[in-house]
Amino acid sequence: MTSSNTYLFFNGNCEEALNFYAKVLGAKIGFMMKAKDAPKSMECDVDMGDGVMHATFMIGETKVLVSDVPPSYYTKPQGFNINVNVAEAADAERAYAALSEGGTQTMPLQETFWAKRFGTCVDRFGIPWMINCEKPM
């Protein structure tokens, strides 16, 4: 294997989520194709409408793959978290506040034995996050 990437599925709000992550995390949106723009030879679910067929974004040096899925295929994300490491406690506080707004704080952002700040939340799109600002070793 040469690499591995996380692939997130959204319930019709993928483009909104991409723009949100660009704003709050400084993520860089890469490739994006809407279902309506797919080649005619490809069969896209008519329920996709203006949905994102496939897109990529970068958080730092990590590539994340995303798309909308037809409503009948969507399931709530569970069993994982996307971990974001930041250098400063203030960056952790800002990222955590933005990601948890309109979502759920599952572990309040706080100092731990390993981190200046650590907390978990689920954003308004249903994606679970871990924000980590490690203490120097």
Image (tube, rainbow, N blue to C red):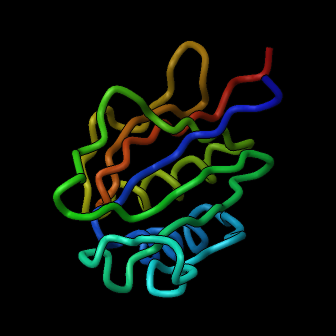
Q: Position of residue 52 (x, y in %)?
A: 46, 73
Image location of residue 120, percent across then percent down? 39, 36
Tell me if residue 18 comes above or below residue 117 in the rendering. Answer: below
Which residue is at a point 39% across and 72% down the rendered structure image?
44
At x 59% / y 66%, what residue is drawn? 55
Image position of 132 (left or right of 123):
right
Residue 128 location (% of width, % of height): 37, 42
Residue 1 to residue 95: above or below: above
Tell me which residue sits at (83%, 28%) in the image.
Answer: 2
Q: Between 36 and 43, which is closer to the camera in this rendering? A: 43
Quadrant of residue 121 within the rendered picture: top left
Q: State how many labels appear.
A: 0
Identify the residue at the far left of this view.
72
User: The N terminus lies in which quarter of the figure?
Assistant: top right
Front-most of residues 60 and 70? 70
Q: Quadrant of the C terminus?
A: top right
Q: Nearer the viewer, residue 93 or 66?
A: 66
Q: Quadrant of residue 69?
A: bottom left
Q: Is residue 9 left or right of residue 137?
A: left
Estimate the x, y position of residue 25 in percent, counting from the top left: 61, 61
The image shows residue 83, relative to residue 61, as above or below, that is above
Q: Is residue 105 left or right of residue 99?
A: left
Residue at 50 percent of width and 31 percent of height:
118
**Residue 29 vs residue 65: left or right?**
right
